[in-house]
Image (cartoon, helix red, strand yellow):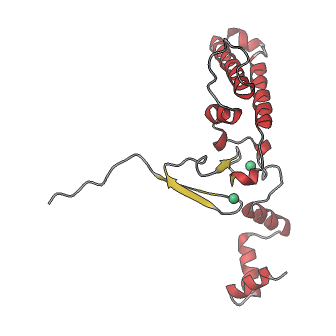
Amino acid sequence: MKIRKSFVTNSSSSCYVCHFCGESASGWDIGIREAGMYMCENEHVLCKEHYGEISEEKIYDYYRKYLIDEIYKCYIVDDDLINNTREIKRRISTTTNFFKMLKEMEKSYYGAQDLDDYVEEYDNVKEFVEENFDFSYNVPSVFCPVCNFEKILDYEGFQYLLKITGHTEKTLLEKIKKEFKSHDEFMKFNRKT
Ligand SMILES: [Zn+2]
Ligand SMILES: [Zn+2]
């Protein structure tokens, strides 16, 4: 008997869960962007709405400064550099690349200024940083509400409470077990205001 081969594709199911509200989004081959979420550089995955409005201007200012800082670093010359041809080449290619990115980003923000300027590749800065910096997977921590103590995640808060009360998960469980006859009773206590 011939067994029908299952349909083979390279797609896979992905699921993203918001660390803050627990909302999840899943689908075939969806990225975090399609899921309507962002992940910051410290790996906090949150629904976009928790991040509040991240304006084009803020994004532009952030990456502009980032690129300029990186370019600046390439111009710092020390004694070791003189004999390090590989490093010199790397810096030349980095600066060339980053200057190009700066110009491209400027165009995505202000629009092409010069009529001779070649066609704009990106509609806006968000699209530019999405393509060039993988923004949705790599949101700089300055934009993340958790990294900025505007929101606290359950597990981070829990860890902190253990620390300041001198408990470990084990001693906490022992205490709970001693004080409550059942999980119901425990939850009732937790809900009491
Ligand atoms: Zn959420
Ligand atoms: Zn964060």
Residue drawn 77% across and 12% down? 79
**Relative side of 6 to 183, left or right:** left
Residue drawn 61% across and 46% down? 33
* Residue at the farthest front position: 115
Quadrant location of ligand 1?
A: bottom right
Q: Nearer the viewer, residue 58 or 184?
A: 58
* 167 versus 119 height, above or below: below
Relative image position of residue 146 (x, y in whole percent): 78, 53
* 90 versus 40 height, above or below: above
Q: Nearer the viewer, residue 114 or 160?
A: 114
Quarter occupied by residue 20: bottom right
Relative image position of residue 92 (x, y in whole percent): 67, 13
Q: Quadrant of the N terminus?
A: bottom left
Relative image position of residue 134 (x, y in whole percent): 63, 37
**Relative side of 87 to 9, left or right:** right
* Residue at the farthest left position: 1
**Relative side of 140 to 36, left or right:** right
* 49 versus 96 height, above or below: below
Quarter occupied by residue 116: top right
**Relative side of 119 to 80, left or right:** left
On the question of residue 45 being in view, the answer is no
Q: So how many labels did they put on this image?
A: 0
* Residue at the farthest top position: 82
On the question of residue 159 being in view, the answer is yes
Q: Quadrant of the C terminus?
A: bottom right
Residue drawn 66% across and 58% down? 18
Q: Nearer the viewer, residue 115 or 63?
A: 115
Quarter occupied by residue 75: top right
Relative image position of residue 83 (x, y in whole percent): 68, 9
* Residue at the farthest bottom position: 181
